[in-house]
Amino acid sequence: MDREGPEPRKGMPSPRLDEAEFKRRFRAQFQDRAFDGLERELGRIADAAWDAYDNSRKSPRTRKAGPGFADPDYELSLEWIAAREAVQEAQRRHEQKDGRPRILLVNASARSEHTCPGEMSKSFRLVEIARQVFASGGAEVQLLDLSRLASEYGRNIHPCKACFSTAAALCHWPCSCYPNYSLGQTQDWMNEIYPMWVAAHGIMIVTPVNWYQVSSPLKLMMDRLVCADGGNPDPTRTHGKDAKAAKAIELAGWDYPRHLAGRLFAVVAHGDTEGAENVARTLFDWLSSMHLEPAGHGAELDRYIGYWQPYATSHAELDADTAVQDEVRFAARVLVEAVHAKRAGRLPAGPELAAPREK
């Protein structure tokens, strides 16, 4: 490569911890009394954790990349290799012409009866309504229930580190930022979520409005899907996370691969006071910008359930609001019919398909 990348800008204060503070934080997670008799063992584990942290062993288990990569001798994380293989297999499934169409159905609410809220979410109920429509429409449905981030042990979506904003090539597809064992950033769910998106022919997202925005779990997933839109499928080209090398690659010309292009989508946003229209529009714009395609009129839905009514009776409000239930069913039918039509080669083209429903 002839052109050198600009020097990455530096100057932020270091986040590094000394040994005492690291071990204090590490030990703080073992508060249950069941650990009281394990002081010696925990001390040895803390010593090992400190060694991993002090030596920045982000990916302790690797192997040579092998054929098909720009640098076959580069050591790649075993987790990343497994994630790549899962994504490739999902893409093969997506491209198969036979079999039932696949719908990814996303419950974006963090609320669950299995943790502090003590009650299921209305989003989950709307998802169940949509799932029945997809099943009756002959689709294979995969539910991605993001509420499990808050209710299930070992479920995390760590935040996007914005590698793409340093240089497009530095953002790897699938994401290689996690797991980071030296920083304790483990059990990241996204390596399982990426293949769900890739395999799908259609995606429906159902989200509540949280402070005029999408829910926290949904935003975490959205940010981590940046690698699906222009991400670099070969980390050996950037020698892992070499920012200067990535800048040079981008400036030499980046082809911006759209890894999820052509999948159809529908969105449902519901609120109780305000913001539903903006959230639905945000999701529509985000998915469209990644070159996914709107399923058609009626597949972008924003509604209020129990408008300015007590939260305590919000499920009763949904029970009574049969119009919202019917509109969710209609949005699901629009999506599954569009998926069938596209796979059969008879999907309408042009602005009629792309336009959202009239407000």
Image (cartoon, grey):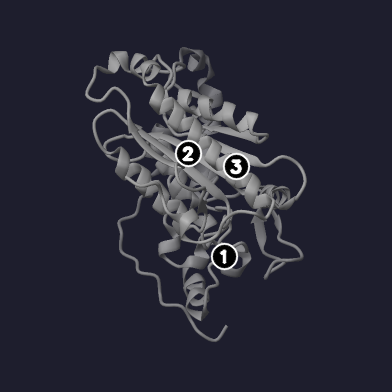
The alpha-carbon separation of the residues under discs 2 and 3 comes to: 17 Å
Q: Is residue 108 left or right of residue 271?
A: right
Which part of the image, by quadrant, shows the C terminus? top left
Q: Residue 306 in the image: x percent, y percent?
A: 29, 22
Q: What's the residue at 36%, 48% (across, down)?
A: 282
Within 10 Å of the Cα at label 3, are there few (<14), some (14-19), or many (20+) other Cα atoms?
some
Against 247, residue 74 (above or below) is above
Q: Residue 311 in the image: x percent, y percent?
A: 28, 18
- The residue where tag 3 is placed is 337
- The residue where tag 2 is placed is 205
Contact, CB < 8 Å: mark 1 with mark 2? no
Q: Tell me the mark number nearer the camera, choosing from 2 and 3.
A: 3
Precedes in sequence: disc 3 or disc 1: 1
The alpha-carbon separation of the residues under discs 1 and 2 comes to: 23 Å
- The residue where tag 1 is placed is 257
Q: SS of the residue at dot 1? A: loop
Contact, CB < 8 Å: mark 2 with mark 3? no
Q: What's the residue at 51%, 46% (across, down)?
A: 265
